Image (cartoon, rainbow, N blue to C red):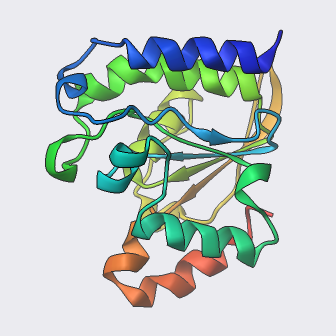
Amino acid sequence: MDKELEMKKIMEEIENCRMCELYKTRSNPVVGDGSLSADTMFVGEAPGYWEDQKGKPFVGRAGKVLDELLESVGLKRDEVYITNVVKCRPPNNRDPLPEEIKACSKYLDRQILLIHPRTIVTLGRFALSYIFEKFGLKEEKISKIHGKVFTVSNIFGRFRIIPLYHPAVAVYNQNMKGTLLKDFKSVK
């Protein structure tokens, strides 16, 4: 399978998607960015204002925090793949609704199959909830399991899932940056 061609198909489908109401208020869908051969995939919740403007994930203030976290373990953006559960910005940065997650999840599922990462890092509770349910893990509060490594085996092989707080938590509470840096060590 030609990964670039397949990702292009996914991008075109997302650009033309009308499965939920978010397409009406978006500036740009945010499909994802990074290496299609990445060992590590980061899954956030939904695009924010700057992501919607630029069509790329994690380019606002939370993106700057994510860049620092990546650097702290010697990773670069072009070595990983970064995406979100929901591909269009919810109005006023509200939480994604269950029907929006359901509408978008087929695209995320295809991205996971295409990239076939060895590690999926969930950023925030909505990504945690979706990925844990998808892979049959018992969901717990992120405050109890952040930074822990969960190993999953399925027909595609064995891989890790690491739930982390969303990088935006450090934007609003500088005291959380130390927790994020500590938890991020489990990614490398």
Above-or-below relation of 146 to 89:
below
- Judge whether residue 29 can be spotted in this image: yes
Q: Residue at x 32, y 52 (%)?
A: 48
State the image coordinates of residue 166 (x, y, percent, origin top left).
45, 62
Say which of 87 and 12 sits in front: 12
Q: Is residue 155 visible?
A: no
Frontmost residue, 138 versus 179: 179
Tell me if 94 is positioned left or right of 142 in this view. Answer: left
Query: What is the x, y in percent for residue 125?
Result: 39, 51
- Horizontal side of 93 relative to 41 (left or right) equals left
Residue at figure coordinates x 50%, y 32% from the top left: 31
Q: Position of residue 34 (x, y in %)?
A: 69, 43
Q: Quadrant of residue 115?
A: top right
Look at the image and tell me in which quarter the C terminus lies: bottom right
- 75 left or right of 101 in image: right
* Closer-to-camera residue (74/133): 74
Where's residue 47, x and y in %? 37, 46
92 left or right of 176 in image: left
